[in-house]
Amino acid sequence: MSWRITFPIAGFLLAASLAAGPRPQFPAAVAPAAAKAESPYAPAYTQEGRLLFPARYREWVFLSSGVDMSYNPKVMAMGHTVFDNVFVNPEAYAKFFQTGTWPDKTVLVLEARMGMEKGSINQQGHYQGTEVMGIEVHVKDEARFPGKWAFFDFDDEVSGSLFPKEASCYSCHAEHAAVDTTFVQFYPTLLPVAKAKKTLSASYLKEEAAAK
């Protein structure tokens, strides 16, 4: 597998090469048996510990869309535009507005799509194509993961594999994310809430002060 994406979670930031081109469309498949989730939107897992695909994530709350956001040189040299769209389960979004941080069982989905240029009447700028180039999910499950949060990578619409704790996405989010290891600084409807609730991380505030 030559591509990989990482949340700026995006707005999760794209963090690995998609140079191999668009990934195939996800095949229809039957999900394996897993433990029942507490709500229709809560994370659920297979017996092997894989995260079940959140099949209706596009009906969730849309947080933001980024264009060519990356700290990875390979992605920046790809030669084509990539959009990343971020969605969150509705109950987590509602709780964030109440508290300024994420509750247990938060699920954030990063969807990467190929950027298109000229098509139909469009002659300038970019729009999103139909090709889904990658799906990555950031899950908060305090009882399951030692660090409360975990990242999963999906190759299909069945189940996703867990990123190992050594993966750079964990340290990047811990060091630079605005709220609870998530990049709320890129979510325009949530950043004002975090500021009002005073839940911005010390590392983010330090970076912001240094940038002024």
Image (tube, rainbow, N blue to C red):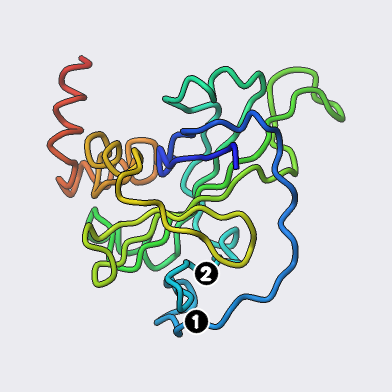
Residue 34 numbered tag? 1
73 left or right, relative to 203: right
* Image x and y of residue 52, in percent: 52, 69
Residue 106 numbered tag? none
Measuring 46% from the left and 27% from the top, which residue is drawn there? 70
Query: Who comes first in sequence, dot 1 or dot 2?
Result: 1
Q: Quadrant of residue 192?
A: top left
Secondary structure of the residue carrying numbered label 2: strand
Measuring 24% from the left and 45% from the top, which residue is drawn there? 179
Mark 1 to mark 2 CA distance (whole Å)? 8 Å
**In the rendered view of the protein, which quadrant contains the N terminus?**
top right
Is residue 42 placed above or below 136 in the rendered structure? below
Q: What amino acid is at disc 1? A: Ala
Measuring 48% from the left and 28% from the top, which residue is drawn there? 69
Asked whether the residues under the numbered discs 1 and 2 touch, taking CB atoms below 8 Å apart as contact, a structural biologist would say: yes
Judge the density around disc 2: few (<14), some (14-19), many (≥20) Cα neighbours within 10 Å.
many
- How many marks overall? 2
Measuring 43% from the left and 79% from the top, which residue is drawn there? 39
